[in-house]
Amino acid sequence: MNKYKIINDPIYGFVNIPDELIYDIIQHPYFQRLRRISQMGLSYLVYPGAHHTRFHHAIGAMHLMQTAINVLKQKNVEITQDEELAALIAILLHDVGHGPFSHALEYSIVQNISHEQISLAIMHELNQIFKGRLDLSIKIFTGQYHKTFLSELISSQIDVDRLDYLRRDSFYSGVIEGQVNSERLIKMLNVNDKHLVIDEKGIYSVEKFIISRRLMYWQVYLHKTGMMLEKILEKTLWRVKELLHQAKPVFLDDNLAYLFNENLRQIDRKSLKIFTALDDSDIWYHLKKWTSNPDFILSYLSKMIVERRSVNKIKIQREQFDDEYIKSLRIKVLQQYPVDENTLSYLLFSGKLTHRAYNQEKQPIKLLSKNNEVIEFAKASDQLNIQALSQPVTKYYLSYPVLKN
């Protein structure tokens, strides 16, 4: 079989599968499952075009990694064939541990374990299947390899992961403000003292990247309706767990029943097999079943997502909401809906959102001048708002059901 295939990607055009091992990993059910995991959670209920998947993103990030490595090689950075293959596999599998609806249900299905931990568990499982050929990929993924820049290409403040998802999510959502010039940024990549840096002339592309990231978070990822629906989805699963604890009837297949009833602290082979059998379609199937559950709260929350009607109102503002205002809403909800003080938080809830477009303190972006001097990006930028973008921004939200006057 010819395993040197090409994939026609709407963002980059033709993407090569450069190695037979990569082809075999892509063909494995663990990876094929990503075709059924939404890249942006429930955002397509706000942006109808945002139906792309983790599969799209993983292939795109691998393509950018391949491009980045070629650029670094042209700049006389020593990268062996084994290191290149390992880095491509590491970025290909960096999100393979995501559960249904990606970040929307992080810690909701498996409470104590992050998707990064599950990704690593899957990589170890695949490493056994492929007889140790992922050893170096795992070292790079976990930041244990001595060529630090390979790990930074996967996870840092300007990695190929972010370069792909910002451009891809912008494309599919139709929010053009999020477009980043990934080709230009990758051309500007370099290495200094085993760390990833940006050639100084790429400073304006970095500025645009950070501004685009800020716009995408507040306009798309933290869009008030999309965020509220994802909170509703979380609360739906919490309600299911509460009903199970109360021994009340609720439909669950064997996989979800196992994960909901086990307080997992680590992923073993059994739980990994069960978790990787789940995707978005399983949750949609359960949501449709739960719309007819006799419990009002479970039925109401499920219908809100499945039918996208009677959707909660949501307000977002810079200041915390007035206690008296929240109290007045509580009274109305208790009067108009069959809930009590113990279950009110399923319908009326509040919280805060915090985002920082650029973190100067954690792996700051470094620029490399022509005389090989390394400069911290924020100090070199003449954009006054870069300093402002490095500060965390907090907003407060309040969500409540439709109320009569």
Image (spheres, rainbow, N blue to C red):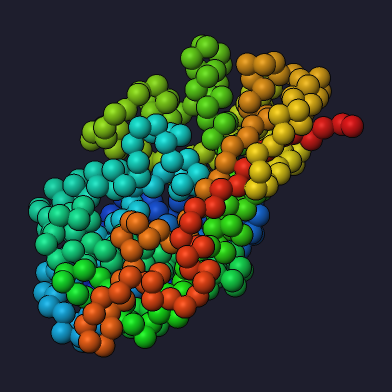
Q: Percent from the top left, x then y, of residue 293?
A: 64, 23
Image height check: is 4 above or below 45?
below
Residue at left 29%, top 38%? 272
Q: Percent from the top left, x then y, of residue 95?
A: 35, 53
Image height check: is 176 above or below 44?
below
Tell me the quarter of the picture where residue 378 sits. Answer: bottom left
Instruction: Please state which of residues 340 and 255 is positioned toward the viewer in this rendering.
Output: 340
Image height check: is 266 above or below 94?
above
Left or right side of 397 for 151: left
Image height check: is 302 above or below 134?
above
Residue at left 79%, top 35%? 402
Q: Percent from the top left, x then y, of residue 359?
A: 40, 58
> In the rendered view of the protein, which quadrant contains the C terminus?
top right
Left or right side of 323 for 166: left
Residue at left 42%, top 26%? 260
Residue farthest to the right, as pictured:
405
Instruction: Please state which of residues 169 and 125 is positioned toward the viewer in this rendering.
Output: 169
Q: Percent from the top left, x then y, of residue 48?
A: 64, 59
Tell me the quarter of the picture where residue 310 sits. Answer: top right
Tell me the quarter of the picture where residue 70 sits. Answer: bottom left
Residue 306 visible to an observer of this rendering? no
Instruction: Say how many tags the image has.
Output: 0
Residue 114 visible to an observer of this rendering? yes
Instruction: Please state which of residues 208 and 386 is positioned toward the viewer in this rendering.
Output: 386
Residue at left 48%, top 68%? 386
Left or right side of 224 for 65: left
> In the rendered view of the protein, which quadrant contains the N terminus?
bottom left
